[in-house]
Image (spheres, grey):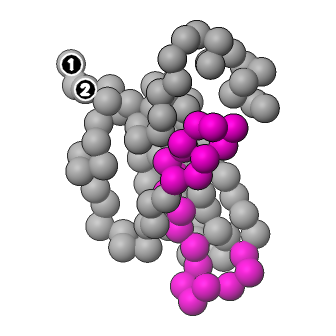
Amino acid sequence: MGTPDEHRTRDEHTTSDERFTHGTATVDGVDLHYVECAPTPPVDAPLVVLLHGFPECWYSWRHQLPALADAGYHAVAPDMRGYGESARPTGTASYRIDRLTD
């Protein structure tokens, strides 16, 4: 049985697409890792946010990110709280649906 995606490190989520940019945004006190891919050359492109399900991470969207960028979109795939390289707040209350969607 393989290691679940939420326990992998960035080194295990490598891709050959050099257009991927990794970043971190602090949202309501929680550091969320994200990967983005934008059209080349940079333009004012419409934003598409790709949200993964359980138990995945941004890497699930690795093929769609460059395809969307090639189609003229600025694509962003965050690691949801508790997954991938995003922070893992303690306590089950941190993962209630009202906290995840707020």
Looking at the image, which residue sits at the far bottom? 41
Establish if 63 lies above or below 102: below
Q: Which dot marks residue 1?
A: 1
**Three-letter residue code for mark 1:** Met
Q: Is residue 52 visible?
A: no
Q: Is residue 20 visible?
A: yes
Q: Is residue 10 left or right of residue 80?
A: left
Q: Is residue 100 left or right of residue 25?
A: right
Image x and y of residue 35, in percent? 49, 57
Q: Are marks 2 and 1 in contact (CB under 8 Å)?
A: no
Marks 2 and 1, how far apart in space? Answer: 7 Å
Establish if 74 lies above or below 39: above
Image x and y of residue 65, in percent? 52, 60
Q: Nearer the viewer, residue 65 or 24?
A: 24
- What residue would you read off at disc 2? 3
Q: Label 1: how many residues lie within 10 Å, few (<14), some (14-19) or many (20+)?
A: few
Q: Nearer the viewer, residue 79 or 38?
A: 79
The magenta-colored residue range is 24-45
Q: Residue at x 72, y 76 (%)?
A: 45
